[in-house]
Protein backbone atom coordinates (compact mmCIF):
# COMPACT_ATOMS: atom_id res chain seq x y z
CA UNK A 1 0.00 0.00 0.00
CA UNK A 2 1.34 3.43 -0.98
CA UNK A 3 1.53 6.45 1.31
CA UNK A 4 -1.55 8.06 -0.19
CA UNK A 5 -3.60 4.88 0.17
CA UNK A 6 -2.42 4.39 3.75
CA UNK A 7 -3.34 7.95 4.66
CA UNK A 8 -6.76 7.53 3.08
CA UNK A 9 -7.29 4.29 4.98
CA UNK A 10 -6.36 5.94 8.27
CA UNK A 11 -8.76 8.78 7.60
CA UNK A 12 -11.57 6.34 6.84
CA UNK A 13 -10.83 4.41 10.04
CA UNK A 14 -11.04 7.60 12.05
CA UNK A 15 -14.41 8.44 10.54
CA UNK A 16 -15.70 4.95 11.29
CA UNK A 17 -14.94 5.09 15.03
CA UNK A 18 -15.88 8.65 15.76
CA UNK A 19 -19.64 8.42 15.86
CA UNK A 20 -19.94 7.04 19.38
CA UNK A 21 -17.41 9.34 21.00
CA UNK A 22 -18.71 12.15 23.26
CA UNK A 23 -18.07 15.82 22.64
CA UNK A 24 -15.91 17.48 25.29
CA UNK A 25 -15.85 21.10 26.48
CA UNK A 26 -12.95 22.02 28.77
CA UNK A 27 -13.15 25.42 30.47
CA UNK A 28 -9.98 26.58 32.22
CA UNK A 29 -9.61 29.56 34.49
CA UNK A 30 -6.26 31.07 35.40
CA UNK A 31 -5.08 31.41 38.99
CA UNK A 32 -8.44 30.42 40.50
CA UNK A 33 -7.89 29.03 43.98
CA UNK A 34 -9.64 25.83 44.95
CA UNK A 35 -9.97 27.13 48.50
CA UNK A 36 -13.05 28.97 47.23
CA UNK A 37 -14.53 25.72 45.91
CA UNK A 38 -15.12 23.50 48.95
CA UNK A 39 -18.06 21.87 47.15
CA UNK A 40 -18.53 23.84 44.00
CA UNK A 41 -18.19 27.60 44.41
CA UNK A 42 -18.49 29.02 47.93
CA UNK A 43 -22.01 30.14 48.84
CA UNK A 44 -21.05 33.81 48.96
CA UNK A 45 -19.59 33.91 45.45
CA UNK A 46 -21.88 35.36 42.76
CA UNK A 47 -21.50 32.46 40.37
CA UNK A 48 -24.88 31.07 39.26
CA UNK A 49 -23.50 29.23 36.23
CA UNK A 50 -20.63 27.58 38.10
CA UNK A 51 -23.09 26.61 40.84
CA UNK A 52 -25.45 25.06 38.30
CA UNK A 53 -22.55 23.15 36.73
CA UNK A 54 -21.42 21.94 40.15
CA UNK A 55 -24.87 20.53 40.84
CA UNK A 56 -24.48 18.29 37.77
CA UNK A 57 -20.81 17.41 38.33
CA UNK A 58 -18.39 15.29 40.28
CA UNK A 59 -16.62 17.90 42.41
CA UNK A 60 -13.06 17.28 43.56
CA UNK A 61 -12.62 19.32 46.73
CA UNK A 62 -8.89 18.63 47.08
CA UNK A 63 -7.52 18.96 43.55
CA UNK A 64 -3.96 20.24 43.19
CA UNK A 65 -1.88 21.61 40.37
CA UNK A 66 1.14 19.67 39.10
CA UNK A 67 3.15 22.90 39.42
CA UNK A 68 1.94 26.29 40.76
CA UNK A 69 2.88 28.42 37.75
CA UNK A 70 1.21 28.90 34.38
CA UNK A 71 3.42 27.17 31.79
CA UNK A 72 4.62 24.22 33.90
CA UNK A 73 1.17 23.73 35.41
CA UNK A 74 -0.52 23.75 32.01
CA UNK A 75 2.02 21.46 30.36
CA UNK A 76 1.51 19.01 33.22
CA UNK A 77 -2.26 19.32 32.91
CA UNK A 78 -2.19 18.63 29.18
CA UNK A 79 0.32 15.77 29.29
CA UNK A 80 -0.33 14.10 32.65
CA UNK A 81 3.39 14.51 33.36
CA UNK A 82 5.25 16.50 36.01
CA UNK A 83 7.77 19.24 35.07
CA UNK A 84 10.70 16.94 35.86
CA UNK A 85 9.46 14.75 33.01
CA UNK A 86 8.22 17.42 30.54
CA UNK A 87 11.17 19.75 31.04
CA UNK A 88 8.72 22.66 31.35
CA UNK A 89 10.23 23.98 34.55
CA UNK A 90 9.17 27.61 34.28
CA UNK A 91 7.30 30.14 32.12
CA UNK A 92 10.04 30.19 29.47
CA UNK A 93 10.88 26.49 29.15
CA UNK A 94 10.09 24.76 25.88
CA UNK A 95 7.24 22.26 25.73
CA UNK A 96 8.66 19.85 23.17
CA UNK A 97 6.52 18.53 20.36
CA UNK A 98 7.15 14.84 21.09
CA UNK A 99 5.23 14.84 24.38
CA UNK A 100 1.66 13.65 23.78
CA UNK A 101 -1.15 15.76 25.24
CA UNK A 102 -4.83 15.02 25.64
CA UNK A 103 -5.28 16.83 22.32
CA UNK A 104 -3.01 14.27 20.65
CA UNK A 105 -4.77 11.31 22.25
CA UNK A 106 -8.22 12.57 21.31
CA UNK A 107 -7.19 13.63 17.83
CA UNK A 108 -5.65 10.23 17.13
CA UNK A 109 -8.97 8.65 18.10
CA UNK A 110 -10.92 10.75 15.62
CA UNK A 111 -11.64 14.01 17.41
CA UNK A 112 -11.35 17.48 16.03
CA UNK A 113 -9.46 19.42 18.68
CA UNK A 114 -9.56 23.17 19.11
CA UNK A 115 -8.19 25.73 21.58
CA UNK A 116 -9.52 29.19 22.25
CA UNK A 117 -7.36 31.17 24.64
CA UNK A 118 -4.31 30.77 26.78
CA UNK A 119 -2.14 27.68 27.26
CA UNK A 120 1.28 29.35 27.62
CA UNK A 121 3.10 27.11 25.17
CA UNK A 122 6.77 28.04 24.88
CA UNK A 123 8.64 27.12 21.73
CA UNK A 124 7.91 26.90 18.01
CA UNK A 125 5.15 24.32 18.49
CA UNK A 126 2.09 26.38 19.41
CA UNK A 127 -0.49 23.64 18.82
CA UNK A 128 0.57 20.51 20.75
CA UNK A 129 -2.12 18.36 19.25
CA UNK A 130 -4.75 21.03 18.71
CA UNK A 131 -5.91 21.02 15.12
CA UNK A 132 -6.94 24.64 15.38
CA UNK A 133 -6.28 27.64 17.61
CA UNK A 134 -8.76 30.46 17.52
CA UNK A 135 -6.67 33.11 19.31
CA UNK A 136 -3.06 33.88 19.97
CA UNK A 137 -1.72 33.47 23.51
CA UNK A 138 -1.67 36.33 25.98
CA UNK A 139 1.94 35.62 27.05
CA UNK A 140 5.15 35.36 25.02
CA UNK A 141 6.19 32.05 23.48
CA UNK A 142 9.97 32.59 23.61
CA UNK A 143 12.70 32.05 26.23
CA UNK A 144 12.72 35.63 27.53
CA UNK A 145 11.28 34.82 30.96
CA UNK A 146 13.99 32.36 31.96
CA UNK A 147 15.00 32.40 35.65
CA UNK A 148 18.67 32.06 36.56
CA UNK A 149 19.71 29.83 39.45
CA UNK A 150 23.28 31.14 38.97
CA UNK A 151 22.25 34.48 40.51
CA UNK A 152 20.01 33.61 43.46
CA UNK A 153 18.10 36.55 44.84
CA UNK A 154 18.53 38.71 41.74
CA UNK A 155 15.25 40.23 40.48
CA UNK A 156 14.65 40.41 36.76
CA UNK A 157 12.56 43.56 37.02
CA UNK A 158 10.96 43.68 33.61
CA UNK A 159 9.01 40.43 34.02
CA UNK A 160 9.18 39.25 37.64
CA UNK A 161 5.96 39.53 39.62
CA UNK A 162 5.64 42.57 41.87
CA UNK A 163 2.97 43.93 44.17
CA UNK A 164 1.83 46.63 41.75
CA UNK A 165 -1.09 44.33 40.98
CA UNK A 166 -2.17 44.79 44.61
CA UNK A 167 -1.72 48.54 44.90
CA UNK A 168 -3.29 49.04 41.46
CA UNK A 169 -6.45 47.02 42.11
CA UNK A 170 -9.72 48.63 41.06
CA UNK A 171 -12.25 48.93 38.24
CA UNK A 172 -11.96 49.42 34.50
CA UNK A 173 -14.27 48.65 31.63
CA UNK A 174 -11.50 47.38 29.41
CA UNK A 175 -8.01 46.10 30.15
CA UNK A 176 -5.45 44.00 28.36
CA UNK A 177 -6.86 40.90 30.05
CA UNK A 178 -10.52 41.79 29.54
CA UNK A 179 -9.86 42.43 25.87
CA UNK A 180 -8.21 39.02 25.64
CA UNK A 181 -10.86 37.02 27.47
CA UNK A 182 -13.74 38.77 25.69
CA UNK A 183 -12.19 37.58 22.45
CA UNK A 184 -11.55 34.08 23.83
CA UNK A 185 -15.23 33.74 24.72
CA UNK A 186 -16.42 35.29 21.45
CA UNK A 187 -14.30 32.94 19.35
CA UNK A 188 -15.36 29.91 21.40
CA UNK A 189 -19.05 30.74 21.08
CA UNK A 190 -18.63 31.22 17.31
CA UNK A 191 -16.89 27.85 17.15
CA UNK A 192 -19.73 26.15 19.01
CA UNK A 193 -22.19 27.62 16.54
CA UNK A 194 -20.03 26.40 13.68
CA UNK A 195 -19.83 22.90 15.17
CA UNK A 196 -23.61 22.76 15.41
CA UNK A 197 -23.94 23.01 11.64
CA UNK A 198 -22.71 19.44 11.34
CA UNK A 199 -20.37 20.03 8.43
CA UNK A 200 -17.67 17.98 10.19
CA UNK A 201 -18.95 14.58 11.36
CA UNK A 202 -16.20 14.07 13.93
CA UNK A 203 -16.76 14.49 17.65
CA UNK A 204 -15.08 17.55 19.06
CA UNK A 205 -13.00 18.65 22.01
CA UNK A 206 -13.02 22.41 22.53
CA UNK A 207 -10.74 23.88 25.18
CA UNK A 208 -11.62 27.41 26.27
CA UNK A 209 -8.89 28.85 28.47
CA UNK A 210 -9.27 32.28 30.08
CA UNK A 211 -6.67 34.49 31.78
CA UNK A 212 -8.99 35.66 34.60
CA UNK A 213 -9.09 35.92 37.58
CA UNK A 214 -5.27 36.17 37.29
CA UNK A 215 -3.83 39.48 38.52
CA UNK A 216 -3.86 42.44 37.99
CA UNK A 217 -6.95 42.60 40.18
CA UNK A 218 -8.95 44.89 37.91
CA UNK A 219 -12.60 44.17 37.12
CA UNK A 220 -15.59 45.67 35.39
CA UNK A 221 -17.82 47.73 37.63
CA UNK A 222 -20.83 45.43 37.25
CA UNK A 223 -18.83 42.53 38.69
CA UNK A 224 -16.96 44.65 41.24
CA UNK A 225 -20.16 45.97 42.78
CA UNK A 226 -21.36 42.44 43.50
CA UNK A 227 -18.79 42.32 46.31
CA UNK A 228 -19.14 45.76 47.88
CA UNK A 229 -20.41 44.21 51.10
CA UNK A 230 -18.40 41.00 50.90
CA UNK A 231 -17.35 39.57 54.26
CA UNK A 232 -14.21 37.98 52.79
CA UNK A 233 -12.14 40.99 51.79
CA UNK A 234 -9.56 40.35 54.52
CA UNK A 235 -7.35 37.25 54.59
CA UNK A 236 -8.17 34.54 57.11
CA UNK A 237 -4.48 34.16 57.93
CA UNK A 238 -2.88 37.49 58.80
CA UNK A 239 0.47 38.36 57.22
CA UNK A 240 3.49 36.71 58.78
CA UNK A 241 6.47 38.95 59.50
CA UNK A 242 9.22 38.49 56.96
CA UNK A 243 11.70 37.18 59.53
CA UNK A 244 9.19 34.55 60.69
CA UNK A 245 8.46 33.19 57.19
CA UNK A 246 9.84 29.89 55.93
CA UNK A 247 12.86 30.29 53.59
CA UNK A 248 10.92 29.81 50.34
CA UNK A 249 8.25 32.31 51.38
CA UNK A 250 11.01 34.83 52.11
CA UNK A 251 12.38 34.23 48.63
CA UNK A 252 8.93 34.79 47.13
CA UNK A 253 8.46 38.02 49.05
CA UNK A 254 11.85 39.22 47.84
CA UNK A 255 11.13 38.20 44.27
CA UNK A 256 7.91 40.25 44.43
CA UNK A 257 9.91 43.28 45.62
CA UNK A 258 7.81 43.59 48.78
CA UNK A 259 9.98 46.30 50.33
CA UNK A 260 9.14 48.69 47.48
CA UNK A 261 5.41 48.66 48.31
CA UNK A 262 3.49 49.83 51.36
CA UNK A 263 0.57 47.39 51.28
CA UNK A 264 -2.35 48.68 53.34
CA UNK A 265 -5.48 46.80 54.45
CA UNK A 266 -7.41 48.82 51.86
CA UNK A 267 -5.07 47.61 49.12
CA UNK A 268 -5.62 44.04 50.25
CA UNK A 269 -9.40 44.44 50.35
CA UNK A 270 -9.51 46.03 46.90
CA UNK A 271 -7.27 43.32 45.42
CA UNK A 272 -9.45 40.59 46.85
CA UNK A 273 -12.62 42.35 45.67
CA UNK A 274 -11.19 42.59 42.15
CA UNK A 275 -10.27 38.91 42.26
CA UNK A 276 -13.74 37.84 43.40
CA UNK A 277 -15.30 40.13 40.78
CA UNK A 278 -13.29 38.39 38.09
CA UNK A 279 -14.49 35.00 39.30
CA UNK A 280 -17.96 36.33 38.52
CA UNK A 281 -16.66 37.45 35.12
CA UNK A 282 -15.48 33.89 34.42
CA UNK A 283 -18.86 32.63 35.58
CA UNK A 284 -20.54 34.92 33.06
CA UNK A 285 -18.37 33.55 30.25
CA UNK A 286 -19.08 29.96 31.31
CA UNK A 287 -22.76 30.82 31.16
CA UNK A 288 -22.37 32.02 27.58
CA UNK A 289 -20.72 28.75 26.58
CA UNK A 290 -23.33 26.58 28.31
CA UNK A 291 -26.16 28.65 26.83
CA UNK A 292 -24.69 28.21 23.35
CA UNK A 293 -24.45 24.45 23.83
CA UNK A 294 -28.12 24.44 24.83
CA UNK A 295 -29.20 26.71 21.98
CA UNK A 296 -27.40 24.55 19.43
CA UNK A 297 -28.69 21.31 20.97
CA UNK A 298 -25.24 19.84 21.44
CA UNK A 299 -24.36 17.46 24.23
CA UNK A 300 -20.88 17.52 25.72
CA UNK A 301 -18.88 16.41 28.71
CA UNK A 302 -17.95 19.62 30.56
CA UNK A 303 -14.80 19.96 32.65
CA UNK A 304 -14.01 23.07 34.68
CA UNK A 305 -10.52 23.50 36.09
CA UNK A 306 -7.77 26.02 36.83
CA UNK A 307 -4.02 25.83 36.34
CA UNK A 308 -3.15 26.93 39.92
CA UNK A 309 -4.44 29.22 42.66
CA UNK A 310 -3.60 32.57 44.28
CA UNK A 311 -2.55 33.29 47.86
CA UNK A 312 -4.49 36.60 47.85
CA UNK A 313 -2.62 38.00 50.82
CA UNK A 314 -2.91 34.92 53.04
CA UNK A 315 0.28 34.65 55.18
CA UNK A 316 1.35 37.93 53.52
CA UNK A 317 1.91 36.12 50.21
CA UNK A 318 0.46 36.87 46.79
CA UNK A 319 0.03 35.07 43.48
CA UNK A 320 1.27 31.46 43.41
CA UNK A 321 4.74 29.78 43.22
CA UNK A 322 4.35 27.73 46.40
CA UNK A 323 2.57 24.63 47.69
CA UNK A 324 0.35 26.27 50.29
CA UNK A 325 -3.34 25.61 49.80
CA UNK A 326 -4.21 29.00 48.28
CA UNK A 327 -1.65 28.63 45.49
CA UNK A 328 -1.64 24.89 44.89
CA UNK A 329 -5.30 23.88 45.21
CA UNK A 330 -7.62 24.35 42.25
CA UNK A 331 -11.28 23.77 41.39
CA UNK A 332 -11.98 20.66 39.37
CA UNK A 333 -15.47 19.61 38.27
CA UNK A 334 -16.44 16.97 35.72
CA UNK A 335 -19.95 16.83 34.30
CA UNK A 336 -20.50 13.69 32.24
CA UNK A 337 -23.61 11.63 31.44
CA UNK A 338 -22.20 8.47 33.02
CA UNK A 339 -21.07 10.16 36.25
CA UNK A 340 -23.53 10.82 39.04
CA UNK A 341 -23.01 14.19 40.79
CA UNK A 342 -20.90 13.72 43.89
CA UNK A 343 -18.31 15.31 46.16
CA UNK A 344 -14.91 13.61 46.22
CA UNK A 345 -12.58 14.66 49.04
CA UNK A 346 -9.66 12.36 48.20
CA UNK A 347 -6.66 14.43 47.04
CA UNK A 348 -6.18 14.42 43.26
CA UNK A 349 -4.20 16.38 40.70
CA UNK A 350 -4.63 18.22 37.43
CA UNK A 351 -2.15 15.72 35.95
CA UNK A 352 -4.96 13.18 36.34
CA UNK A 353 -7.20 14.99 33.84
CA UNK A 354 -5.56 13.65 30.66
CA UNK A 355 -5.92 9.96 31.66
CA UNK A 356 -9.48 10.75 32.78
CA UNK A 357 -10.36 12.33 29.44
CA UNK A 358 -9.08 9.27 27.64
CA UNK A 359 -11.12 7.05 29.96
CA UNK A 360 -14.25 9.11 29.33
CA UNK A 361 -13.73 8.78 25.58
CA UNK A 362 -12.77 5.10 25.74
CA UNK A 363 -9.24 5.78 24.48
CA UNK A 364 -6.26 3.71 25.56
CA UNK A 365 -3.12 5.46 26.82
CA UNK A 366 -1.26 2.18 27.23
CA UNK A 367 1.49 3.24 24.82
CA UNK A 368 2.64 6.04 27.11
CA UNK A 369 1.32 5.18 30.57
CA UNK A 370 4.77 4.04 31.80
CA UNK A 371 5.89 7.65 31.30
CA UNK A 372 2.70 9.28 32.61
CA UNK A 373 2.50 10.53 36.20
CA UNK A 374 -1.26 11.03 36.37
CA UNK A 375 -3.97 8.40 36.70
CA UNK A 376 -7.62 8.31 35.73
CA UNK A 377 -10.14 9.83 38.12
CA UNK A 378 -12.94 7.60 36.86
CA UNK A 379 -12.65 5.00 39.66
CA UNK A 380 -12.80 7.75 42.29
CA UNK A 381 -15.69 9.49 40.51
CA UNK A 382 -17.58 6.19 40.57
CA UNK A 383 -17.10 5.64 44.29
CA UNK A 384 -13.81 3.75 44.53
CA UNK A 385 -10.87 4.67 46.79
CA UNK A 386 -7.32 5.79 46.05
CA UNK A 387 -4.16 5.84 48.14
CA UNK A 388 -1.72 7.30 45.59
CA UNK A 389 -0.19 10.55 46.88
CA UNK A 390 -0.60 13.80 44.97
CA UNK A 391 2.77 15.04 43.69
CA UNK A 392 3.83 18.61 42.97
CA UNK A 393 6.99 20.25 41.69
CA UNK A 394 8.22 23.83 41.44
CA UNK A 395 11.47 25.05 39.89
CA UNK A 396 10.75 28.53 38.61
CA UNK A 397 10.65 32.23 39.52
CA UNK A 398 11.37 32.84 43.20
CA UNK A 399 13.03 29.43 43.79
CA UNK A 400 16.76 28.83 44.10
CA UNK A 401 16.50 25.08 43.75
CA UNK A 402 13.55 22.78 42.96
CA UNK A 403 10.82 22.25 45.54
CA UNK A 404 8.72 19.08 45.70
CA UNK A 405 5.49 18.34 47.52
CA UNK A 406 3.34 15.37 48.48
CA UNK A 407 -0.27 15.35 49.64
CA UNK A 408 -1.65 12.09 50.98
CA UNK A 409 -4.61 11.73 53.29
CA UNK A 410 -4.63 14.57 55.80
CA UNK A 411 -0.95 15.34 55.38
CA UNK A 412 1.12 17.59 53.13
CA UNK A 413 4.91 17.36 52.92
CA UNK A 414 7.22 19.91 51.24
CA UNK A 415 10.95 19.49 50.64
CA UNK A 416 13.77 21.45 49.04
CA UNK A 417 17.51 20.75 49.19
CA UNK A 418 18.06 24.27 50.56
CA UNK A 419 15.32 24.33 53.19
CA UNK A 420 14.03 22.57 56.31
CA UNK A 421 11.14 20.20 55.64
CA UNK A 422 7.54 21.34 56.03
CA UNK A 423 4.81 19.00 57.22
CA UNK A 424 1.19 20.01 57.79
CA UNK A 425 -1.91 18.16 58.95
CA UNK A 426 -4.63 19.77 56.85
CA UNK A 427 -7.49 18.23 58.80
CA UNK A 428 -6.37 19.75 62.10
CA UNK A 429 -4.64 22.76 60.60
CA UNK A 430 -6.27 23.73 57.27
CA UNK A 431 -4.45 27.08 57.18
CA UNK A 432 -1.05 25.40 57.56
CA UNK A 433 -0.04 27.40 60.61
CA UNK A 434 1.98 24.70 62.40
CA UNK A 435 4.93 22.93 60.80
CA UNK A 436 4.91 19.41 62.26
CA UNK A 437 8.18 18.29 60.65
CA UNK A 438 10.08 18.75 63.92
CA UNK A 439 7.25 17.54 66.15
CA UNK A 440 8.48 14.39 67.96
CA UNK A 441 4.98 12.90 67.73
CA UNK A 442 5.18 13.12 63.91
CA UNK A 443 8.65 11.64 63.53
CA UNK A 444 7.40 8.45 61.85
CA UNK A 445 4.99 10.30 59.57
CA UNK A 446 7.70 12.71 58.45
CA UNK A 447 10.13 9.83 57.86
CA UNK A 448 7.53 8.06 55.73
CA UNK A 449 7.04 11.13 53.53
CA UNK A 450 10.80 11.71 53.36
CA UNK A 451 11.23 8.16 52.10
CA UNK A 452 8.45 8.58 49.52
CA UNK A 453 10.10 11.76 48.28
CA UNK A 454 13.53 10.14 48.11
CA UNK A 455 12.10 7.24 46.10
CA UNK A 456 10.47 9.60 43.61
CA UNK A 457 13.01 12.40 43.31
CA UNK A 458 16.74 12.85 43.04
CA UNK A 459 16.77 16.49 44.12
CA UNK A 460 20.41 17.01 43.16
CA UNK A 461 19.76 15.59 39.70
CA UNK A 462 16.57 17.65 39.37
CA UNK A 463 18.50 20.80 40.28
CA UNK A 464 21.22 19.99 37.74
CA UNK A 465 18.66 19.44 34.96
CA UNK A 466 16.98 22.78 35.69
CA UNK A 467 20.31 24.60 35.70
CA UNK A 468 21.29 23.01 32.40
CA UNK A 469 17.98 24.06 30.83
CA UNK A 470 18.29 27.63 32.12
CA UNK A 471 21.89 27.98 30.97
CA UNK A 472 21.06 26.81 27.46
CA UNK A 473 18.19 29.28 27.18
CA UNK A 474 20.29 32.16 28.44
CA UNK A 475 22.48 31.54 25.39
CA UNK A 476 19.74 30.85 22.84
CA UNK A 477 17.34 33.69 23.69
CA UNK A 478 19.70 36.67 23.17
CA UNK A 479 21.13 34.99 20.09
CA UNK A 480 17.71 34.67 18.46
CA UNK A 481 16.93 38.34 19.16
CA UNK A 482 19.93 39.46 17.12
CA UNK A 483 19.43 40.17 13.42
CA UNK A 484 16.34 38.77 11.75
CA UNK A 485 13.75 37.76 14.31
CA UNK A 486 11.08 35.13 13.70
CA UNK A 487 8.60 35.13 16.59
CA UNK A 488 7.00 31.91 17.84
CA UNK A 489 3.84 33.64 19.02
CA UNK A 490 0.82 31.98 17.44
CA UNK A 491 -0.76 33.85 14.57
CA UNK A 492 -4.42 32.84 14.13
CA UNK A 493 -5.11 32.38 10.47
CA UNK A 494 -8.33 33.42 8.78
CA UNK A 495 -8.99 32.71 5.15
CA UNK A 496 -10.91 35.81 4.25
CA UNK A 497 -11.66 34.38 0.81
CA UNK A 498 -13.57 31.50 2.45
CA UNK A 499 -15.62 33.56 4.91
CA UNK A 500 -19.16 34.80 4.50
CA UNK A 501 -20.04 35.08 0.77
CA UNK A 502 -17.54 34.94 -2.09
CA UNK A 503 -18.01 34.50 -5.84
CA UNK A 504 -16.81 30.91 -5.99
CA UNK A 505 -19.73 29.97 -3.72
CA UNK A 506 -23.39 29.35 -4.44
CA UNK A 507 -25.30 31.83 -2.30
CA UNK A 508 -28.31 29.55 -1.86
CA UNK A 509 -26.19 26.61 -0.71
CA UNK A 510 -24.11 28.84 1.57
CA UNK A 511 -27.07 30.41 3.36
CA UNK A 512 -28.66 27.03 3.98
CA UNK A 513 -25.42 25.42 5.17
CA UNK A 514 -24.71 28.20 7.66
CA UNK A 515 -28.18 28.14 9.21
CA UNK A 516 -28.94 26.21 12.39
CA UNK A 517 -31.53 24.93 12.85
CA UNK A 518 -32.37 24.81 9.18
CA UNK A 519 -36.08 24.09 9.03
CA UNK A 520 -37.60 26.26 11.75
Image (cartoon, helix red, strand yellow):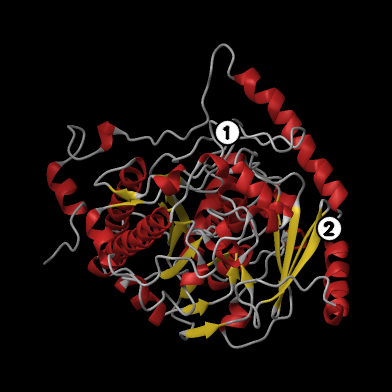
Q: Which residue in the structure is indicated by mark 2?
A: 457
Q: In which quarter of the image is residue 175?
A: top left
Q: Is mark 1 on a helix, strand or loop?
A: loop
| Residues tagged 2 and 1 counted as in contact (Cβ below 8 A) | no
Find the distance from the CA under tag 2 to the CA under tag 1: 30 Å
Residue at 35% from the left image edge and 44% from the top image edge: 180
Mark yes or no: residue 233 visible.
yes
- For label 1, the residue is 124
**Corner quadrant of residue 62:** bottom right
Residue 242 percent location from the top left of the image: 64, 53
- For this rendering, which residue is in front, 321 or 122? 321
Q: Where is residue 376 in the image (x, y as percent from the top left)?
A: 63, 72
Relative image position of residue 284 (x, y in whole percent): 29, 62
Nearer to the camera, 18 or 355: 355
Q: With 465 as the anchor, is 319 left or right in this view?
A: left
Query: SS at mark 2?
Result: loop
Q: Which residue is drawn at 78% across and 37% down?
A: 467
Residue 360: horizontal and vertical position, in percent? 54, 72
Q: Which mark is residue 379?
A: none
Q: Nearer the viewer, mark 2 or mark 1?
A: 2
- Residue density around tag 1, few if under 14, some if 14–19, many if 20 or more, within 10 Å: some
Amino acid sequence: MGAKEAAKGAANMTTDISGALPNILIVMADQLSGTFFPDGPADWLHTPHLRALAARSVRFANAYTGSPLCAPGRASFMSGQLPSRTGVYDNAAEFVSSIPTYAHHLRRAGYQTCLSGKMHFVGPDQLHGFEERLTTDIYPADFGWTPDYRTPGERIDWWYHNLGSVTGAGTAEITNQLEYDDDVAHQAVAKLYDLSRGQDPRPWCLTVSFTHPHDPYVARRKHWDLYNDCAHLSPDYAPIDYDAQDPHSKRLMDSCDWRAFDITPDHVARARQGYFANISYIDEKLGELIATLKATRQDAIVIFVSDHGDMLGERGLWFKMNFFEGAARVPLMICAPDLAPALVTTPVSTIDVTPTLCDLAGISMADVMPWTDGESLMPLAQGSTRETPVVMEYAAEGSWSPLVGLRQGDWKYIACALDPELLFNLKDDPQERVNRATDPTCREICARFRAMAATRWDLAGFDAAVRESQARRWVVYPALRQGGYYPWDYQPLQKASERYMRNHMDLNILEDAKRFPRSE
